[in-house]
Amino acid sequence: MEDININSRETNASEDELSQPVFLLSQGDGILRVERDHRNMKQIMDDVLVIDSNCIDIGANAGEVLGWIVQRSPKGEHYAFEPLMQFIPHLKAIFPGIKLYQCALSNIVGTSKFCHVVNLSEWSGLRPQPCPIEPVAEEIDVEVNFIDNIIPQEIQIRLMKIDVEGGEYNVIDGAKKTIRRCRPYVIFEHAKLHAFGYGTTPQMLYDLIVEECGLAIFSLDGKGPHSKNTFASKCEEAFVTRYKKHTETNFLARPI
């Protein structure tokens, strides 16, 4: 494993953008924003999940969101994906009935370098990104796969959660057949800060979700469906305001 300087790795961000004070983000604002989003995510799950709903958790980390899913759908068939070995024993112990895959998801099969932020594991991903603290990072090798290569055709997926630090475009691209077939509710994160290293934009993600997958994009509180311009504006507002508590980084894609 190779120690790396995550902020020195190549991204599609300009030098001026990368030098902006990401590390000066208001901790209080971030906590309030996350608490709001978590309340809304739980409400969405309350509204759409039943006891045997089947779900997918992409970027399971320590299993917080997976726990909400299993609590609401204990008889469902659930798939969880987490590339970091440090979380695998815990996830296996807490959720023995789920199908757990130690891999990163994208739109290809193979192996890839993965940037593990040791002191902020939830900011780890297939591409480096600016961090809100001075990162201690290492580059590791991980297996890579895609949803359409894993989920059986006979399984109907009700809900997907995607939190992959900027790689959501490739994840959704690799899940198009499953999304078109199942028309699930998809809770996903998208923030300009995270997407720097992937060369993707809100407009590209909107076209993939709406035009190719046939879903509509909403705020987690139910406002929407959003136009492409509105979705892009929300992503830009979050970035330029340094992710203040009123801004949005998590969204819901769903059928209408």
Image: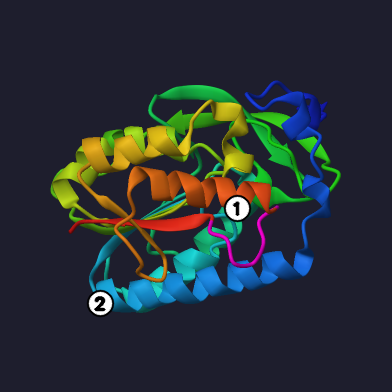
C-alpha distance separating marks 2 and 1 = 36 Å
Q: Secondary structure at mark 1?
A: helix
Which residue position holds label 2?
Answer: 51
The amino acid sitting under disc 2 is Ile
Asked if the magenta segment contains residue 189, the reply would be: no
- Quarter-of-image position of residue 153: top left
Q: Which mark is residue 238?
A: 1
Q: Which mark is residue 34?
A: none
Farthest residue to the right: give it.
Answer: 134
Relative to 136, is 115 on the left or the right? left
Relative to 179, is 21 on the left or the right? right
First of labels 2, 1 by sequence position: 2
Is 233 in front, or is 116? 233
Q: Secondary structure at mark 2?
A: loop
Q: Residue at x 22, y 43 (%)?
A: 178
Bounds of the magenta segment: 242-248
Which of discs 2 and 1 lies nearer the camera? The answer is: 1
The answer to whether any part of residue 6 appears in the image is: no
**Residue density around tag 1, few if under 14, some if 14–19, many if 20 or more, within 10 Å:** some
